[in-house]
Image (spheres, rainbow, N blue to C red):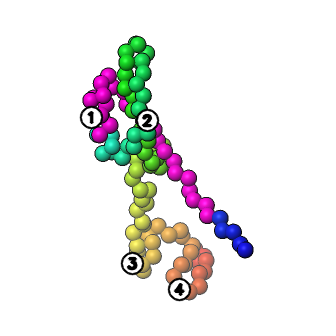
Amino acid sequence: MTKIVTIKAQQKWEYYFESRKTETALLKSLNDLGQQGWELIDVLYHKDIKGIMTWTGIMKRPSIPQPPQGDEGSPNLTRAAPLDKNGAPSGQPKGFDLSGEEFQIKDE
């Protein structure tokens, strides 16, 4: 009897918390965040740093991979060199004949 092991990619999450003084204000914020894909995972009613009772909602959503730093999300495009009258790139190095089935080096 053989055993089959299935390996799945682990889901990555990003987390966010929202604090409000009243339940009503927190509920409005949570509804707005829910429309953006955030899922409520916990609510805390606690004293904040100033000693004021505060509602805090903790949310999560699947993490979206970010492009590497310095990349504004635009694809890396390179413009092709124009073709000469023979259909070969005009920027082709001198001394090479790249036409035909065999490639040969030309003496210049």
Q: Quadrant of residue 78?
A: bottom left
Location of mark 3 (residue) = 85
Location of residue 25 in the rendering, given as x and y in whole percent from the top left corner? 27, 29
Pick whichever of labels 3 and 1 is earlier in the sequence: 1
- Badge 4: how crowded within 10 Å, few (<14), some, or many (20+)? few
Nearer the observer, 60 or 93: 60
Residue at position x 32%, y 22% in the image:
21
Contact check, label 3 and label 4, Cβ < 8 Å: no
Q: CA distance from mark 1 to mark 4?
A: 70 Å
Location of residue 83 in the rendering, given as x and y in whole percent from the top left corner? 40, 73
Q: In the structure shown, which secondary structural element does the residue marked by tag 4 occupy?
A: loop
Residue at position x 45%, y 72% in the image:
89
Q: Which mark is residue 42?
A: 2
Location of mark 4 (residue) = 100
Q: Is residue 43 visible?
A: yes
Q: CA distance from mark 2 to mark 3?
A: 69 Å
Location of mark 1 (residue) = 28
Pick whichever of labels 1 and 2 is earlier in the sequence: 1
- Badge 2: how crowded within 10 Å, few (<14), some, or many (20+)? few
The magenta stretch is 6-31
